[in-house]
Amino acid sequence: MQKIIKITILFIFLFVIGIFYISLSRDTNYNTSSLINKETPEFKIISFDESDTYTRDDIKKNNYTLINFWASWCAPCKIEHPILMKLSQKKNLMILGINFKDKDPQARTFLNELGNPYDLLAKDKNGKQSVKFGIYGIPESILINKELIIIQKFIGPLSVDDYDNIIKIIEKS
Amino acid sequence: MKLNLILLLFIFFSKFSFAAEKTVDPNLIHKNLRCLVCQGQSISDSNSDFAQTIKLVVKDLIDEGKTEDEIYEFMSDKYGDWIVFKPQFNTQNSLLWILPYIALIFGGFFIFTFLKKRQ
């Protein structure tokens, strides 16, 4: 009996240590792993000039699409803008810009000053459409292929490494 | 007369509970969703931009007729299981849900044999 008690206590002790170890070594920050390789959600988003709406059908036409969530009030969006301008020169890639919770005049000024890298420009006034893409802050970008599968999601401003990564993917095909 | 009264009460309470089952409480959902941009706050506690947007989406989903579980599923699908305070029962979380029952059964068995031996 004594032996069973000792083994049980040891087992409980090791179990608790194991749980602590797993919990503490686990990354609690939000990551994008749950979205990768999933199909792009159904969406219907209004164009920036409110003359049209964009859906998944508009993405299907291109080999690759980069959906970029941005706003004029977002400082890191200014940092990534030159990279978006460079990406806009690539023929294999379409960029859909979604202006997130922004005011139209400010957004227009932002693009006039820094350039417009977007093939399609839409707006999400209240952020509800962005939730469908798992957006929780901007800038965020999502790379999608022709089959509407999410290949990669970039949280925060696009870096030079991200640029190289995107180029590698789109030039592979 | 007594039987009629009991029947009436039964119908009233069953209708009441039916109505309660159908209503989805947005506040309860907000409390069970984690604000991803805050430090340990729920959507209900937070006034952040993210929380405001999630509240709008939850309202829309309720209006669409989605149940509480469907709303959690939608959010987990978009942001991962981390957004839900109460984890869902799936293969990844199964141990978390089953383990307390296993511990209870083993603990009960252990106490039972221990007491029996002492007697």
Image (spheres, helix red, strand yellow):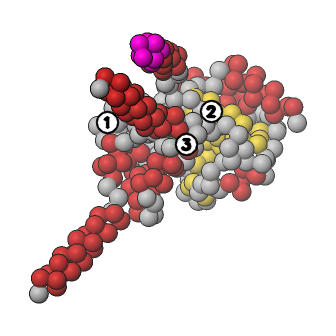
**Of the pair A135 and A121, the residue shown nearer to us:** A135
Image quadrant of residue A35? top right
- What secondary structure is marked by label 1? loop
Q: Secondary structure at mark 2?
A: loop
Q: What residue is drawn where x is 42% and y is 17%?
A: A1
Q: Amino acid at mark 3?
A: Asn
Q: What chain does badge 2 belong to?
A: A
Crowd band around label 1 with a 10 angstrom C-alpha radius: few (<14), some (14–19), many (20+): some
| Residue A107 picture location, percent across and down | 51, 39
Q: Quadrant of residue B65?
A: bottom left
Of all residues shown, which one is farthest toward the bottom?
B1
* Residue stretch in magenta: A1-8
Sequence-first tag of 3 and 1:
1
Alpha-carbon distance for marks 1 and 2? 25 Å
Task: Give amino acid for label 2.
Answer: Ser
- Label 3, secondary structure: give it: loop
- Quarter of the image with the C terminus of chain A in it: top right
Camera-side mark, 3 or 1: 3
- Residue that badge 1 annotates: B46
Q: Find out whether residue A3 is within the magenta segment.
A: yes
- Spot the residue most to the left: B1
Residue B60 visible somewhere in the drawing: no
The percent position of residue A172, horizontal first and vertical second, equals 87, 31
Residue that carries the numbered disc 3 in the rendered image: B90
Chain ID, mark 3: B
Q: Is residue A57 visible?
A: yes
Q: Residues within 10 Å of mark 3 (few under 14, many from 20)?
A: few
Residue A101 against residue A54 in the figure, above or below: above
Give the left or right position of residue B42, taking residue A53 as reference.
left
Position above or below: A137 against A40? above
Q: Which residue is mark 2?
A: A33
**Does the magenta stretch mainly form a helix, a strand or a loop?**
helix
